[in-house]
Image: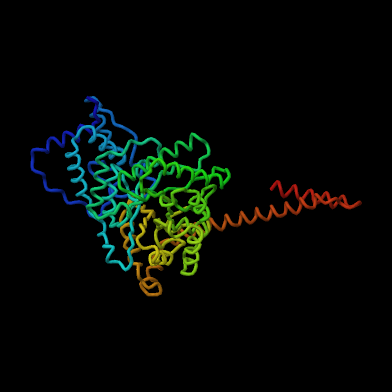
Amino acid sequence: MPRQSLRTRRTVAEASQTKPQPEPEPKKPAAAATPKKTRTAAAAGPKAATGKVSDVEEEESDSKLEAPTAGEAKASRNARATKRKTVAEDDDEVVKAEKASKPAAKKMRTAKAKIEDIVPLAKRTAVSSLKKTIYIGAHVSGAGGVQNSVHNAVHIGANAFALFLKSQRKWDNPPLAAEARDAFRSLSKEHGFDSCRHCVPHGSYLVNLAAAEKAKADQAYTSFLDDLRRCDALGIVLYNFHPGNTNGGDRAEAISRIAAQLNKAHQATKGSKVVAVLENMAGQGNVIGCKFEDLRDIIAQVDDKSRVGVCIDTCHTFAAGYDLRTPEVFAKTVQAFDDLVGNSYLRAFHLNDSKAPFDSHRDLHANIGTGFLGLRAFHNVMNHAPFQGLPMVLETPIDRKGADGKAVEDKQIWADEIKLLESLIGMDPEGDEFKALDVKLQKQGEAERNKLQAQADKKGAMEAKKAEKAAKGKVGGAAKKKAPAKGNKKAADSSDGDEDASESE
């Protein structure tokens, strides 16, 4: 018999002790309280969405707790009394323990009991009651099993959601558990989520389909293909991912490699309806996808056009130099996308304001209405008729300072932002209600905008100075190449000196 962890033995013992007894009345849950990361999985239950989408890996720790001796057990209990493992480790350990030692029926009853402890932060809006058919949600946690993402979406009142299908910070992951697969499908149906339209999983940040080196390209492809197959198993149709990075190589060649990998993956999953959804990017460094032309060129080389699409991130769009802030510039950007890519390929949105100014090429998400995009940009998105029916997913920050000054996750922020965005549908942007909201939200983000604007101004000044020096260098170089007239050697020597000085600065 394999050795079990202390948590495994305690879980099994508790389950066996309570089996013959009537089920006690559930304790009254703490209203809207956000479980701290230091709580154990048994106390916290299936967690609601994480504040940062990149935190999912922290919720899926690789560490395992070995079964201790009697003396070690006592020491371990004392240690946990003062410094507990993170919720991520506990969640992961409990799931592994349940798989190893508990029947599926008992596991599901335990999970159900824990889910009942979660108090919804907001009631889900009936989409049919909205003036436009808009599905809004957030990127929630799938820690402890992908099925928990459904509960976490309901917890914040979402009608759409995203998640990571596996750890997004490591290459090797266990296969999708049959119990998790079946529970995800069942819960999606129970809560009215059409996983073909409302769920948009996010790919791993490690995957770069543009990689030129064979070993890295194969590793990226294997992970990508695995995610497509997980989507198939879960009944999910839309799979969102970042296109890739040139790593300093030729851009056109990198784009061709991305398309080739997509074609290969599509061939390996013939009969599947899963759509690979390219996300537009902010434009840092060698990242592909910051220009609509990049997306166009990838799609042009994909053989099965029915299995490729685009997800527009509002922050990335703005940072890459496409404006959305007024009806006029919004219409211009939308038209540019349609002309270059085609609206028929638009399959989803990531809704994020921007902490950084326009055309900054910085991927810094802000809460809705508090950043440089402002509330009017999101009013434009919410009320654009062709966007109806698309899943729209928040990736905004939900960290706030607790009483002790430390950052804590407040999922109420997402619940409130979902209601805010829904309220914009049909709202008069010239009315008092909208103007009051706009002023309030802009005030909240003023300090952060000022800080980022100062950084942008400093960077702009430095770049202007460099450009000026480069221009002087060119002028000096031209003077050096020109042969000096006889008797004018002193002037020629002076030009050489200026050029050298310019290049050395």
Toward the viewer: 76 or 344?
344
Q: How is the image coloured?
A: rainbow
Instruction: Please state the horizontal and vertical placement of residue 103, each as a whole percent of the image.
Output: 18, 35
x, y percentage for residue 134?
33, 62
Q: Is residue 38 above or below residue 473?
A: above
Residue at 19% across, 46% down: 112
When the figure is inspected, residue 436 is found, relative to residue 419, above or below; the finding is below
Q: Quadrant of residue 31?
A: bottom left
User: Taking the image as drawn, is residue 18 in sight?
Assistant: yes
Q: Residue furthest bottom?
A: 431
Q: Residue at x 31, y 41 (%)?
A: 88
Choose between 194 and 174: the one closer to the eye: 194
Report the quarter where the N terminus lies.
Answer: top left
Quarter of image, res 85? top left
Task: Report the residue at 24% width, 35% height from top.
Answer: 99
**In the foreground, 171 or 79:** 171
Whole-percent x, y for residue 475 in the image:
75, 54
Count the marks: how many? 0
Q: Residue at x 13, y 35 (%)?
A: 16
Residue 279, compared with residue 426, is above or below; it is above
Give coordinates of residue 488: x percent, y percent. Answer: 88, 52
Residue 400 visible in the shown view:
no
Which residue reaches farthest right?
487
